[in-house]
Amino acid sequence: MSAATTEAGKEPGASARAAGYRPVPNWPNTPDGWKWGQVVQVIVDTQDRVFFFQRDSPAVSIWNTDGDLLETWPEPIGFDDIHGAYYGEDADGEYLLIIDRNANRLARTTLSGEVVWSRDDLGFNRPTDAGVASNGDIYVSDGYGNPYVHRLTSKGEPIARWGTSGVGPGQFNLVHSVWMTDYRGEETVYVCDRHNYRVQRFSLDGEYRGKATGARRPTDLVVGPDGTRYVTELDARVTLLDTDDHPIAHIGGVAQHEPGEFVSPH
């Protein structure tokens, strides 16, 4: 695939690749005997604690920005296959939304893993991720077995869903991630449409708003405080987009284990 492009066709020049980014060696400070499995999600809370979710034990670990291990969730954690996790804060405090792919389950937990509520009756078929809009509504990408985005209340009650299989606008081929952010003055749902090599945009009601194409099998998207979009791509790269979804830099791009490169960013 080519470098990520938008419908306007902009591409970053070679000088923009990974501008201002460098690997930090020997981070984190893993204890003796520590074993990493497949890391499926990384999130950061308001205290700058870094949460790693992995397909190994311990499934959830929490580190500070110096790379020191703070704590791990006790095993067993009560989830079969954590595929996505979202950090949020509302009137009831800080929380996580956990997507359990194999159990077709969405759960709200505390930051220590205690389940506040859980739903496995929403018709999911191997869901992948969840995100929250400014009004508290939850959006779930679903996923490996369904071509849907679900919209739920903050308590997990269904409101609507959209999507069909295909390559056209509003269609999906592996709905892998969902995130809400501003796009030109409108709160917008971003969806990583992995095997269609694109990120699609929708209104909160599911109306198609456009796309950014050329991503190398995009797996996740998060937005920084300045509006920069960070897109992980399964094919060994992270792409940065500006607030108009034009690519401004790439990190990595060659599938290898060297610092600054990736194998399968998830």
Image: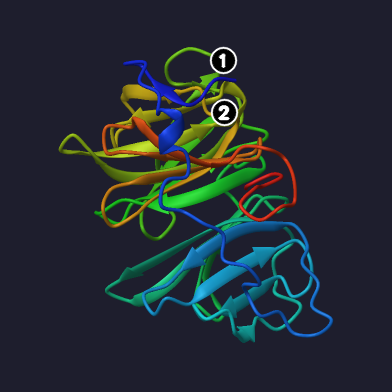
**What kind of element bears circle 1?**
loop
Mark 2 and mark 1: Cα distance apart in space: 9 Å
Q: Considering depth in this image, is 104 or 266 the residue closer to the camera?
A: 266
Residue 239: percent from the left, percent from the top? 48, 39
Badge 1: how crowded within 10 Å, few (<14), some, or many (20+)? few
**Mark 1 residue type:** Gly
Answer whether residue 202 is visible to the viewer in this image: yes
- Residue 160, located in which quarter of the rendered image? top left
Left or right of 236: which side holds 11?
A: left
> In which quadrant will I find the N terminus?
top right
Given residues 138 and 236, the one toward you in this image is 236
Query: Which amino acid type is marked by label 2?
Result: Pro
- Is tag 2's residue or tag 1's residue first in the polypeptide sequence? 2
The answer to whether 81 is drawn above or below residue 61 in the figure is above
Q: Could you tell whether 39 is left or right of 91 in the image?
A: right
Q: Residue furthest left?
A: 185
In the rendering, which numbered label is found on residue 166?
A: 1
Q: Which residue is mark 2?
A: 147
Q: Check whether the beta carbons of the residues at disc 2 and disc 1 lie within 8 A of each other.
A: yes
For label 2, the crowd category at 10 Å Cα-Cα, with few meaning under 14, some 14 to 19 and many 20 or more, is: many
